[in-house]
Amino acid sequence: MSDAADRVTAPGLRPHDDHPDPSVAARGAVDTAAIRVVMQSTDKPRVAVIGAGSWGTTFAKVLAEGGAETVVWARRPEVAREITETKRNSDYLPGINLPRTLTASTSLAAVLAGAEQVYVSVPSQTLRSNLAAIRELLPADVPVVSLMKGVEKATGLRMSEVLLQGLGIDQDRIAVASGPNLALEIARRQPTAAVVSSSSVDTATAVAAVATNPYFRSFINTDVIGTEFGGVLKNLIAVAIGIVDGVGYGENTKASIITRGLAEMTEFAVSLGAQPSTLSGLAGLGDLIATCQSPLSRNNTAGRLLGQGYRFDEVVRQMNQTAEGLASVAPILELARANGVDMPIVGQVGEVLAGRLDPRNIAPHLTETDEPQGE
């Protein structure tokens, strides 16, 4: 699984003929003509995307350009109107043209009616409050896919577990999608890969078939625990990388945190039932690399502000979008303590968030003891 991104192929590269920024072509983007072929020649299942933030809108674009008839639920009428009428979502994806076939609505009933697959992309801490309305309208027997990377603060539950409780559906109908998926790069059609995970191979396969197009390739596995925790834990390490970046430390420091962070991620996830190989794949190492190194990462940005001396509440106010890593630190540390797992890097992030640790001191001690340890 770890070499999945290497096997992604993209038909010829040339400038987008519908992208407002010519410089995008120089950065690499899949041929627009290839997208048209897929959209015109593929059977078109109807899919619903719940959430019109940057990732929800981007994934809706992926689905639409993979041939699916895609409708997005937006909380705000002005966002729904802009997506439907002007094919833009300027609040979250400035400068990006959306497919002409993509529409949006503030009516959950309208969005869910006739849906053959449902993708959910709302902030993790508000998911449960949205599920009562979705449950009443959810078409029978359709897969429900979590696009979220967080844990519920009050319970420590993964998003698939919250979906299971809140929707009351069979576990085999639930899938999760994860991987190195920075929204703006994907919205610009820069090739990447993801992994779709479900306890049911049939569900994972059905979802991956729809969530694939010439620039976005979905692989599958059945390790839901590892796939979800990979997506959660890499956010916490990305906050740490942002902090040391904000302080001004260099590449050695960041490489040490990424490497030891992956070890923390793997030990934690395996202690809760994950397969170690999953943490070496797209949902673990792949996502960790992308999130830690990119200024497009919200968690990296939040960490950088902390490293520059901003308080936690000031960072939250400055962020236009949710940085899931900030809300996940406390419940992850509680789960780690309950399972006897040491997470010194995540623990230090928690201390910085609480104002008890100077950001400059997050890196010098990457373990909880001064005694030599095996790597």
Image (cartoon, helix red, strand yellow):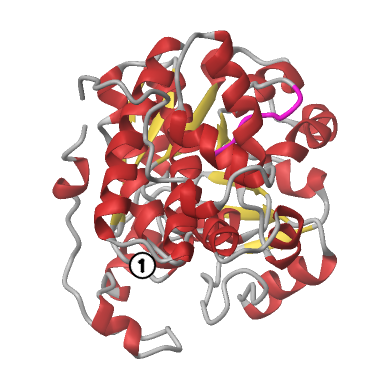
Most foreground residue, 279 or 57: 279
Q: Looking at the picture, how far across and down is residue 36, in whole percent?
A: 35, 69
Q: Is residue 1 left or right of residue 293?
A: left
Most foreground residue, 299 or 4: 299
Residue located at (20% from left, 20% from top): 374
Instruction: Examine the rendering and report whether any part of residue 141 can be seen.
Output: no
Q: Which residue is mark 1?
A: 189
Q: Looking at the picture, how far across and down is residue 172, in whole percent?
A: 52, 15
Secondary structure under the numbered disc 1 in the rendered image: loop
Residue located at (57% from left, 71% from top): 93
What's the amino acid at mark 1?
Arg
Residue located at (50% from left, 35% from top): 346
Outermost front residue: 370
* Magenta span of residues: 149-154
Q: Looking at the picture, how far across and down is residue 85, in whole percent?
A: 70, 77
Query: The N terminus appears in which quarter of the rendering?
Result: top left
Q: Looking at the picture, how far across and down is residue 269, in whole percent?
A: 42, 20
| Majority secondary structure in the magenta region | loop
> From what the image shows, is residue 354 above or below residue 135?
below
Query: The C terminus appears in which quarter of the rendering?
Result: top left
Residue located at (72% from left, 57% from top): 316
